[in-house]
Structure formats: C-alpha cells, structure tokens
Image (tube, helix red, strand yellow):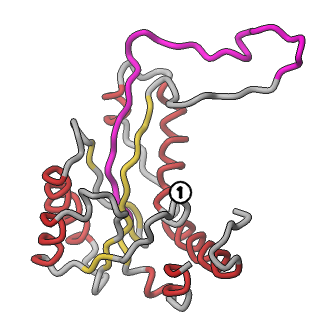
Amino acid sequence: MEFAERHQEWTIEDWKRVIWSDETKINHLGSDGRKYVWKDVEEGLSDRLVEGTVKFGGGNLMLWGCMGWDGVGYATKIEGKMDRELYKAILEDELQQTLNYSKSVDDIIFQQDNDPKHMSKKAQKWFQDNGVTVLKWPAQSPDLNPIEHLWNYLKRRLAEYEESANSVGELWDREVVGGDSKAGMSELIRRLAAVVRAKGGYTKS
C-alpha cells in the first residue's frame, strides 16, 4: 500500500526511467510442482491425463534479466549458486551494458527485490560508486514487477521448442526475444491503482 501510494502520481515519463530486473527458473521437460487435470470420476488414466517423464535430459535453467520501457536489456545464465559475488558481477556486466545501451534515458532508476544478495554491502557500494538510484521496493510484491509479463512470454515461447530440445543448454541457445514492455508498464500502473482502491488488501487481479 505504501509503495502504491508513493508512486500513484508518477507519470509515464517517470516509469520510463525504470530498469526492471528479476531472476527466473525455466524447466526443461517438467514442472516443479503438481499439475492438475479434469476427469470423470470413473475415467481411468490415459495419455490425455498423464504427462511423460524422462530419466535424463531434464533440468532447469536459471536466468537473470532486465528490461526497460524500450524493451529487453541484457540477460545472463546463472551458473551455480547466485551469491553476492555473482550478483555484483552481473551488475558490472549485464546491467552496465544495459545502462550504456539506454543512453537516451536520463536519471535511470534500477529496480530489484529485497533478496539479501541484492541488499549486500557489495551491491550497495556498486550502486553508489556508479551513481545508480535504486527503487525502494516493498518487502512482499509478487504481482507488481512488470518483468513477470516478459518471463511469461519467454516461457510460453520456449515451451513450443522444449520437447525437441535435447538438453537445457539448447534452451539457452534458442533465441527468443519479444514481449511488450509498454504493456507491462501499463499493467503495473493499473495494479497500483487497484491496490490503492483496495486500501492495501487483495485485488481482483
């Protein structure tokens, strides 16, 4: 609620300054959780109801990426554990390249969540040394980051390809670029208004 109230007067020009970031996991031939299907009580199991599994060739791909008003920024595959050292390296490489690419935008604001590695002294020092303003982000905000629309688009596109991919590495090699950053930003503004109307409570969407 505090975040929504603080930014409800922001204009499109204000939001254009923000570079949004997040990590996501893309599974190859599988899901992390349960999947549900509808069936008649007396209906037995069939190929329609059961998803096949593989003993080898599954796995997942961890990805860090970012985007701004004009589209996607640089992304990187996360090898091993994402810790404060790796995050600082991403800031120095992929984020810096994105900022250099976005020269048309003055006073860029960087968004990240409150993960401990994001809030580490190393990361904070990098932001300070490079003059990057960080957007103050609410502690719990699963539905406010418009980059989620980009991840959904990416996963839908990769799902069309993953059955023919022999390994999770092929998913990384597959070039899938798209998504509408402007539509994501419009959705964010709509959600902020909904949060204010709900006085910080649950919204319908």
Q: Is residue 167 left or right of residue 161?
A: left
For residue 28, which quarter of the picture? Answer: top left
Q: Is residue 61 magenta?
A: yes
Question: Of helix, strand and loop, which mostly describes the magenta segment?
Answer: loop
Q: Is residue 195 left or right of residue 182?
A: right
Q: Quadrant of the N terminus?
A: bottom right
Residue range corresponding to the magenta coloring: 39-67
Which residue, as the protein is rendered here, is positioned at the far left? 129
**What residue appears at the point 50 percent right and 25 percent down from the top-left corner?**
30
Instruction: Compare residues 33 and 150 and report the one nearer the observer.
Output: 33
Q: Is residue 115 above or below residue 102?
A: above
Helix, strand, or loop for circle 1?
Answer: helix
For residue 184, which quarter of the picture? Answer: bottom right
Percent across and percent down for residue 137 are 40, 72
**What residue appears at the point 47 percent right and 21 percent down from the top-left corner?**
164
**What residue appears at the point 52 percent right and 13 percent down from the top-left corner?**
53
